[in-house]
Amino acid sequence: MYHFGKRFIRPLEQLFQFKASSSRLRRLLPENFKKELAVCYSIAIENDVNKRELQVNWDDGTTSRFPHIYLRDNCQCPDCFHSSAKQRLITDSNVFDAYDVNTTALSAKLNSDLRQIEIKWDTDEHISIFDADWLKRRKFPTSGDQVGKKICYSNRRLWASDLNDNIPTVDFNEILSNDMTLYGWLQDLATVGLTMIKNVPKEVGQVDRIASRVAYLRVTNYGRTFTVKSKLNPSNLAFTDKGLSLHTDLPYFELIPGIQLLHCIRQASGGGGENQFVDGFQVANVLKKENPYYFDLLSTHAFIYSDIGNDYVEYNQLSHHPMITLNKHGKVIRFAHNSQARSSLLDVPEDKVTDIYRAFHKVVKIMYDPANLVTKKMDAGDMVVFDNWRVLHGRSAFQVTSEGGRHLEGCFIDWDEAASRMRAIEEKHKLESFTGVI
């Protein structure tokens, strides 16, 4: 009766009969026989009817336990899952059944040739078939796992002044014409956070072309794109010839734009206009090591940022963020700092105000430490693209002459779109590094 190897063990429950009731099948099994065991090569499954869970012993020595309700919820058959929409077919008529934790798998068996697990349910004897590899990719997380991680959060590489003359660089036309170049550039953007695109035409409209290659750009109160050059009565300090301290952009948005593109169409002929960059995650890392108390202050207290004016639209932007945002694992996922836009309203207890300013001072010292700073003066035809949730940027003052002033065009993209494009390329080209979930 027990035949291991390519064939599965005959389920013990097949030796017993089931009698139907009006609502569910009533199980007439002896308590000691309410399990079934099956093996397929080095994979084995055990269906526990009492606990309502399926145990899978994987070929790598790990074990997963899938509650029956989870498996029923994720049935991939055409009656339960729409293949083209890639969504569950839950309607108003079956929404309550979809979350019934008493749902029970009557039997489970393996198909060794197809590496599939077939489950028969107690309601209407519905059949679900799961690909073993598909199910393995959905193992529940242990303390060491990070399930469902976003591609823009993974494999980050911290940097300091070592990135001077080493900024990841790619050709403009290669990004437009080659999926794998686009993918590699987005990977650099996700892991390093600072990239350079060379050989960009020296005319407006090129940031839109790059944004469209990824997905679409993010419209803000400054428009679809924005021009960075000195203006009379500017709506932002960026539109002057003054130097700008290191900052991240648009912290006064609830959803801060994730990626910024800046294209140098014409550089300042009279000198100045060098860009500075610093890795905010590296700054946070140094701060945590040198002063955990300041790190705690800046990751627990939120600061108000505002922007009021009239540009693409009349606006009065206001939002509230800590300088250092952590995920549930305590990992830094965003660094937001903009002294120009930080409101005089300080949402901090009175006895913490002075310490907050001490923490600010410490952060600025780390930022401007030459060991952490990257300086780059862009040439006309360069485009810098960076992670606005991570990389702070600034510039030195520049001089406008009769020969012309400094002219940049910029725009924003959200990380959702960049991560989506990466997953789409992974799926399209069947890359081993696929991070999608379907």
Image (cartoon, rainbow, N blue to C red):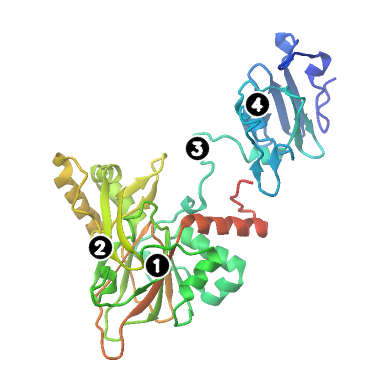
Report which residue position mark 1 lands on: 223
| Picture quadrant where residue 165 is located | bottom left
Q: In this view, does 253 lie to the left or right of 433?
A: left
Residue 368 image label: 2
Report which residue position mark 4 lands on: 68
Q: Nearer the viewer, mark 4 or mark 1?
A: 1
Label 1, secondary structure: give it.
Answer: loop
- CA gap between label 4 and label 2 equals 56 Å
Label 2, secondary structure: give it.
Answer: loop
- CA gap between label 3 and label 4 equals 24 Å
Give the mark nearest the N terminus, 2 or 1: 1
Position in image of residue 16 (x %, y %): 81, 13
Is the Cβ of the residue at disc 3 closer than 8 Å to that at disc 4? Answer: no
Q: In this view, does 334 lie above or below 11?
A: below
User: Badge 2: few (under 14), some or many (20 or more) residues near its Cα, within 10 Å?
Assistant: some
User: Badge 4: few (under 14), some or many (20 or more) residues near its Cα, within 10 Å?
Assistant: many
Q: Identify the residue at horizontal 47%, vertical 64% (top origin).
A: 217
61 or 220, which is in the foreground?
220
**Residue type beneath disc 4:** His
Give the mark nearest the N terminus, 1 or 3: 3
Residue 224 visible in the picture? yes
**Residue type beneath disc 1:** Gly
Report which residue position mark 3 lands on: 144
Q: In this view, does 261 lie above or below 124?
A: below
Q: Identify the residue at horizontal 83%, vertical 15% (top origin).
A: 15
- CA gap between label 1 and label 3 equals 43 Å
